[in-house]
Image (cartoon, helix red, strand yellow):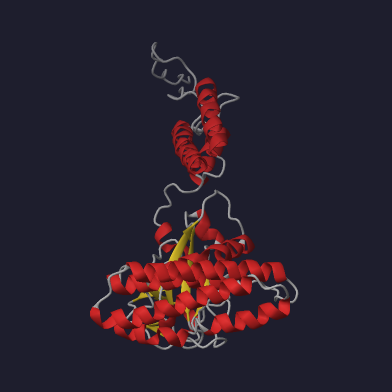
Amino acid sequence: MTLPPPPGPAPSPQHPQGPPESPYRPWGQGYSPQLRPWPVDGFAVASLVCGILCFVPGVGLVLGFVALRRIRRRRERGRGMAITGAVLSCVGLALWGLVIATGGDGPDFGLRDGAAGGAGAGSLVKGECFDVPGDSLSGVMTHDVERVPCGKRHDGEVFGVLRMTGRYYPGPIQLRMTAEAKCPALLDRYALDRWAVPAGVQPYHLTPTPRGWDLGDRGIACVFGHAGVGLTGSLRSDATTLDADQLAFLKAAHVLDLALDARPARGSGRDLPGARRWAVRVAAALGREAGQLRAHRWPAAAGKPVAGLRADLERAEDAWALAAASPDAGTFAVRRSRASALIDPFRSVTARKALGLAAVPPTPGDGAVDAGGGGTDPAFEV
């Protein structure tokens, strides 16, 4: 008889029959087995870019505030970028406001010293000497100007500076017209002794560049120059370089120079009334010069030659007054010729030597600087 197999171990009551259960619950539908970060708000990125570039700081500030509100509502990332963009935009707005309020004359972060290539007209002052590239002042504006001592060879010497105003650059034509109208008066004040200015020296002017104007350069430099030759030593002859006797003599002579400078463009044959008015002015200037020479106390060495010059001036005054009363152009021409001979520059050579002034009169038409008195008219070039 066959016996049945022995029964197996009874199942444990704590563990029912079936496969063992996994200790982890599998991911259900709609879940991802990887964690994903919250997205970055696009407005925060745009605010940061605008703030860094500063070209539209107002937009960057608005975008920053919008981004912060969206981040709080949507729980997105980018709060730091939004705050940074807003702060940078505030800085940009402050800088733009300063530029607009000052007309471009506010902080320039070190650019002003380098404006116009170094020493522009706005930084040059009366009495300074300088060099320019190429040794030519023609066409030069305020760039690449280098100061040098006047005792050394130099291309130009500043005899005056005109200060301009206005926010906007007036343009080269307007600057040139201003220089041509106002520089001659500064020349006369700086170089009272016209005889001391070498032949060939001409007045020029340096004007601000548009970039220099934007950085605050408002100066037109009126300068001496000698094309292709240069200058050595200062041409200044005013109260800073002359003694009292020299200054008195030159101021008296300057009165006559100004009157002779006013000679009419048309001759007496075409404008007799204008020629007569000019002769009246010259006669009055001769009387004033003689009076100033009489009023000054001269040193012993200069007393006699100055007295002789004064007598010539008084005779010339009568002669010019007679020319002013001429009935016709022919008579005027004859009388004017006689009157002019009495103010021949060589008549003042002896007095000039006694006072230690230049004693060689300029030759008419030699191209030297001459604001009047028989020489060529000043030619201003840029």
Residue 269, compared with residue 178, is above or below; it is below
Q: Residue at x 55, y 73 (%)?
A: 260
Q: Nearer the viewer, residue 238 or 269?
A: 269
- Farthest residue toward the right? 270
Q: Nearer the viewer, residue 12 or 107?
A: 107
Where does the C terminus fall, quadrant-wise? Answer: bottom right
Horizontal and vertical percent position of residue 352: 35, 83
Q: Residue at x 39, y 86 (%)?
A: 349
- Farthest residue toward the top? 13
Q: Nearer the viewer, residue 150 or 87?
A: 150
Residue 120 appears anywhere in the view: no
Residue 32, compared with residue 253, is above or below; it is above
Q: Is residue 123 left or right of residue 31?
A: left
Q: Is residue 143 left or right of residue 245?
A: right
Q: Residue at x 30, y 84 (%)?
A: 354
Horizontal and vertical percent position of residue 310: 40, 76
Residue 189 appears anywhere in the view: yes
Residue 236, compared with residue 208, is above or below; it is below
The number of discs equals: 0
Horizontal and vertical percent position of residue 106: 44, 46
Horizontal and vertical percent position of residue 308: 38, 82
